[in-house]
Image: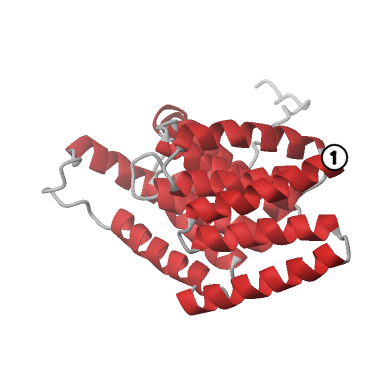
Amino acid sequence: MGREQGVTNRLTFITVAYHFELARHERYVARIENNLAFLLYKLGRYADAHEHLDRAQMIFTRLRDAVSLAQVDETRARVLVAERRYKDADRTLAAVLKTLEKGDESALLADALTVQGVVWARLWAYDASVNALRRAAEVAEAAGALTNAGQAVLTLLEEHGASKRLPPAEVYDAYLRAERLLKGMQDAEDKERLLACARVVMRRLTEPPLTDKNFSFYGAVHEFEARIIGQALDAAGGNITRAGRLLGLSHQTLISILNVRHRALLSKRKPAQKRFKSIIKEPKE
């Protein structure tokens, strides 16, 4: 968002808020204050954003509107992340999630989980971060909030796609999912993020250079193995036996490899069907 457009939007918000105040529509005034704080956060004016959030918080507290208060705190958490105050953001989000988990606001819950995924990544709680972002995408998509789901997947790629915390196959699948969820989007920022994530995916899917300080022979072999097994499972529709045939492996060998070295790929597996023993006995010779 350009500075001139930001100033124009701010003046619009202030004008609207003024008229709502005259009409004594406190709830609308508070929402305008929250929206204005979000705009200021995007413009990098964090101190001003906090001032407007304080006003919104005061009004919603007086109105005893817990869900709207959670929205204000979620915006504040974003500002705190931008200020690199990650522990403060984490404490703020704990109350937000506690409120939203009780309600039926799936899109808001997904957004809060997405911010929490970023916070935990910055606090080096990587597994918790990955799980929060995966859940954010699932909650949003299940609710039909496709843009929110796509943004959660983009955040997963931004925070973890370039690292070894996600196997290349999952990175590739995540990009395809984000592209599908954000299909037809008009937001320029999301388009830029998607393009940046495409570059991350391409780097992960190419051979790692020997000059990479994190390069190891066994790590490279492990990544390539995960990639080829993931492709086989996709081609076989998750059927372990058919995927094994494509790889030249027995059913049991492929299961063993998945359980021991590539548990992240087990989600691609089609649920095993119970095999029934025949009740007809073979005649004795």
Left or right, 274 with respect to 60, comes to: left
Say which of 169 and 69 sits in front: 69
- Horizontally, residue 89 falls left or right of residue 159, namely right
Please report the residue visible at 60 percent of the width from the left and 70 percent of the height from the top. 10
Quick one: which residue is furthest to the front in this view?
A: 22
Instruction: Tell me the kind of residue under disc 1.
Output: Arg
Is any part of residue 235 visible from this angle?
Answer: no
Q: Quick one: which residue is furthest to the left in this view?
A: 211
Q: Quadrant of the rendered structure where residue 272 is?
A: top right
Reply above or below: 204 against 74: below
- Asked whether residue 45 appears in the rendered view, the answer is yes
Name the quadrant of the C terminus.
top right
Q: Which residue is drawn at 51% across and 67% down?
A: 190
Residue located at (81% from left, 60% from top)? 28
The percent coordinates of residue 240 (x first, y second) are: 53, 42
Number of callouts in the render? 1
Image spot of residue 252 (x, y percent): 48, 31
Q: Residues within 10 Å of mark 1 (few under 14, many from 20)?
A: few
Q: Nearer the viewer, residue 107 or 73?
A: 73
Measuring from the top left, give residue 156's x and y in whole percent. 48, 49
Q: What kind of element bears circle 1?
A: loop
Which residue has dot 1 on it?
Answer: 64
Display colour scheme: secondary structure
Q: Where is residue 6 in the image (x, y as percent from the top left)?
A: 53, 73
In the rendered image, the residue lying farthest to the top is: 284
Image point (20%, 40%), residue name = 214
